[in-house]
């Protein structure tokens, strides 16, 4: 495995949890899958559809998102929204993320 491939694997692992947090925060305003993909990318969280849609279903099953179908348009869309439990989870994850970032900033920087 090349150094580039190894780096990409580590970056992917690092980003995985941040996408969950980003989804919970962004979906405080209701949104649908494709729009969320674009919004995540615009905010620096490039995500593949094959990653996002299973994540949305899992978060909904766990009670962190709610959803409803909008059939007002020609093509029905499933809109997701962060639930109260999801908002609590987002606050806890945000606090922990900030604590981790602070801890990393406090490490000796010999790089």
Image (cartoon, helix red, strand yellow):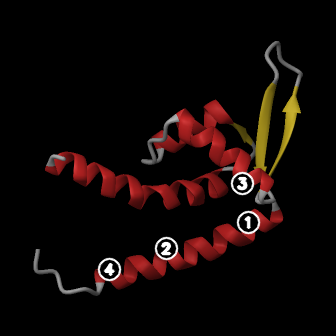
* Location of residue 14 with respect to 92 vertically, above or below: above
Element at label 4:
helix
Measuring 79% from the left and 53% from the top, which residue is drawn there?
61
In front here: 55 or 74? 55
Question: Does the residue at mark 4 contact the one at mark 2 (Cβ under 8 Å)?
Answer: no
Mark 3 or mark 4, whichever is nearer to me: 3
For this rendering, which residue is in front, 75 or 7?
7
N-term-proximal mark, 2 vs 3: 3
| Picture residue at 73% right of the left edge, 72% below the top | 88
Q: Residue at x 69, y 70 (%)?
A: 89
What SS does tag 2 mark? helix
Say whether residue 45 is left or right of residue 21. Answer: left
Q: Identify the secondary structure beneath mark 3.
A: helix
Labelled pair 1, 3 in contact (Cβ < 8 Å): no
Quarter of the C terminus within the rendering: bottom left
Between the residue at mark 2 and the residue at mark 1, the CA separation in whole angstroms equals 15 Å
> Considering only order in the chain, which callout, 1 or 2, is on the residue closer to the N terminus?
1
Cα–Cα gap, marks 2 and 3: 19 Å
| Residue matched to label 2 | 97
């Amino acid at each position: 495995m090349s150094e580039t491939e190894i780096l990409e694997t580590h970056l992917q692992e690092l980003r995985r949890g941040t996408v969950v947090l980003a989804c919970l925060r962004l979906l405080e305003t209701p949104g649908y899958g494709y729009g969320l993909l674009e919004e995540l990318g615009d905010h620096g969280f490039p995500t593949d559809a094959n990653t996002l849609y299973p994540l949305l279903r899992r978060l909904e099953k766990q009670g962190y998102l709610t959803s409803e179908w909008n059939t007002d348009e020609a093509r029905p869309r499933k809109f997701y929204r962060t639930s109260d439990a999801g908002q609590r989870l987002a606050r806890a994850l945000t606090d922990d993320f900030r604590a981790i970032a602070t801890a990393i900033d406090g490490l000796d920087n010999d790089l």
